[in-house]
Image (spheres, rainbow, N blue to C red):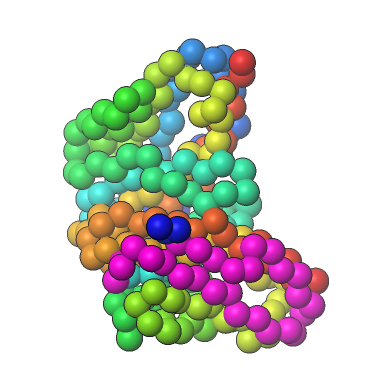
Amino acid sequence: NAGVTQTPKFQVLKTGQSMTLQCAQDMNHNSMYWYRQDPGMGLRLIYYSASEGTTDKGEVPNGYNVSRLNKREFSLRLESAAPSQTSVYFCASSDVGETQYFGPGTRLLVL
Amino acid sequence: QKEVEQDPGPLSVPEGAIVSLNCTYSNSAFQYFMWYRQYSRKGPELLMYTYSSGNKEDGRFTAQVDKSSKYISLFIRDSQPSDSATYLCAMSGPSRGGADGLTFGKGTHLIIQP
């Protein structure tokens, strides 16, 4: 039981490049979330998926897209990376009404 | 005004001391209150959660919620060097998981000196 896994662990991009961050959970949770964590800003919600087939914007969705591929997987895509998207990205999952469990994070540097 | 305020620290205390970590919030709709611990370069891990007002104890950790003052606390007794980490408070409305996500404080960096 791996919990929440994220790939890659670390990535360097040039401005304008695109990439997809992958997240998978093996806890059979319905809800999944993407957060970013920046120094002095705390964790902020980018997008979430309350259940398979649905996605909704969080606090800071601009510049991102998401796909809930199936119940296990929830990906985050940067179509044209910008230096302001340099951050640590965390995926989380929860069952309906239950607490969230976080993955180990992806550190992204955009040059 | 941010929805959740948390002193970033660092807070440095000697081993064995009682640690008090706090958050204040402005949204009276919050009903579930959580504390996460985050070690450097790791993901947050859930430590405690409390529903509405009151206390909850788990080993060396005690969480307190005072909804009338919009104030939550985490106490760590007999602190250990392994408790050195960043502690994040988090809150949600009607559901513990936060159907639309959790609202986090910025985190307090805690250092326990051996």
Please state which of residues A17 and A4 is positioned toward the viewer in this rendering.
A4
* Residue at (54% x, 74% y) in the render: A22
Q: Is residue B93 visible?
A: no
> Residue A82: percent from the left, percent from the top?
71, 77
Q: Is residue B36 visible?
A: yes
Quadrant location, the C terminus of chain B: top right
Badge count: 0
* Residue at (50% x, 78% y) in the render: A75
* Residue at (76% x, 70% y) in the render: A12
Give the quadrant of residue A102: bottom left
* Residue at (59% x, 27% y) in the render: B111
Please state which of residues A69 and B15 is positioned toward the viewer in this rendering.
A69
Please state which of residues A99 and A61 is positioned toward the viewer in this rendering.
A99
> Residue A7: percent from the left, percent from the top?
59, 69
Question: What range is drawn magenta here?
Answer: A4-30
Please determine whether, in this image, residue B78 is positioned above or below residue A54: above
Give the quadrant of residue A105: bottom right
Residue A8 highlighted magenta (yes or no):
yes
